[in-house]
Image (spheres, rainbow, N blue to C red):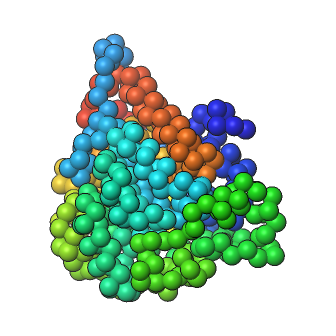
Amino acid sequence: MQLSDCHNVEDFRRLAKACLPKPIFNYIDGAADDERTKDRNTSAFDDCDLVPNVLAGVSEIEMGVTVMGKPIAMPLMLSPTALQRLFHWQGERAVAATAQKFGTWFGISSLATVSIEEIGETIESPKMFQLYIHKDKGLNRSMIERCKAAKFDAIALTVDTIVSGNRERCLRSGFTSPPRFTPASVLSYAIHPMWALNYMFREKFALPNLQTHVDAGSNVAVSVAEYFNTMLDTSMDWAMAEKVRSDWGGEFCLKGIMSVEDAKRAVDIGATAIMVSNHGGRQLDGSRAPFDQISEIADAVGGKIDIICDGGVRRGSHVLKAIAAGATACSGGRLYLYALAAAGEAGVQRVVGKLRDEIERDMKLMGIRSVPELDASKLRWR
């Protein structure tokens, strides 16, 4: 299978599985417990249908939306994800370049493998920083101040990871950051020599936004569960979130909101956006899918805050359904991580281009000339 054979996200998933050592692939692909929520994130879109209109004169359409005060060229954003250098040596640079090419939001994680400063200097399209609240308050202050200096456009505070989910695939494979080569895993790395050569002989793996304060994950190999359970602040609460918003002073998003109650509180503390997200099913298995919650959250806070449906998006029609249900835009991580792992920047550009084409084609087939025309009248629930 080659890049030219990949026409959708699932194609890229298959190619990524062939390209990556098993522990690395399972880190991207896996989720918590029985992985029911991860699967539900995508299957939820099957529970409703689009209702098209015809003879609508759609030779020209407008796909742009505004999210957190920034106009973007399409209603699909690239979510922040961690450790991208492990998946392909181009890492976040490939994803950032793709976001800039397609004129959309891109984010980097606190656990990114490129620095806040580099992204600030090289990327002109809207950029957010995904902040994990650590026990080390100096580290939290440092990351916020570095984002200010680098002129990031938004901070997305992750609120659903005060402890790690039970990611059993990672437990079985022994996945760590950086990778720990053990007798149980070395064969999987050895039979993927291109990945191994790129990992060993290209730019050294590092977590530059953390290593000023902690060695774990960068110089000391730890599992993701161990990192979350020892480094992150389990006492994080609404007062702390409001203080981060105040300290940051700019566009502020809460990533991991799933309930109407929490969406209302996000409005109350002055957040400008929420990512309706269950962390890709990697935290609480048995949680609802983001798409399941969009309608009731939009009914409660629509018009007061931007609502981003984050997770499970695999098709342009999924984006249209989420917006019709009340979302401002959609975002996703795995949808581009598979492509990054499979083919670097060329893969990310191809999958985002395919999804953009699907959104455009589906809007025309729906008889929709602009994104605001998508509303609940265009959906029927099964």
Residue at (34, 13) in percent of width and height? 55
Q: Is residue 318 above or below residue 210?
A: above
Q: Nearer the viewer, residue 327 or 222?
A: 222
Q: Nearer the viewer, residue 204 or 300?
A: 204
Q: Is residue 251 above or below residue 133?
A: above
State which quadrant residue 34 falls in.
bottom right
Q: Is residue 92 above or below residue 231?
A: above
State which quadrant residue 199 falls in.
bottom right
Q: Is residue 311 left or right of residue 27?
A: left
Residue at (36, 52) in percent of width and height? 122
**Horizontal and vertical percent position of residue 285:** 54, 67
Quarter of the figure with the N terminus: top right
State whether residue 365 appears in this view.
Answer: yes
**Horizontal and vertical percent position of residue 182:** 76, 76
Residue at (20, 74) in percent of width and height? 247
**Horizontal and vertical percent position of residue 137:** 32, 85
Residue at (63, 47) in percent of width and height? 342
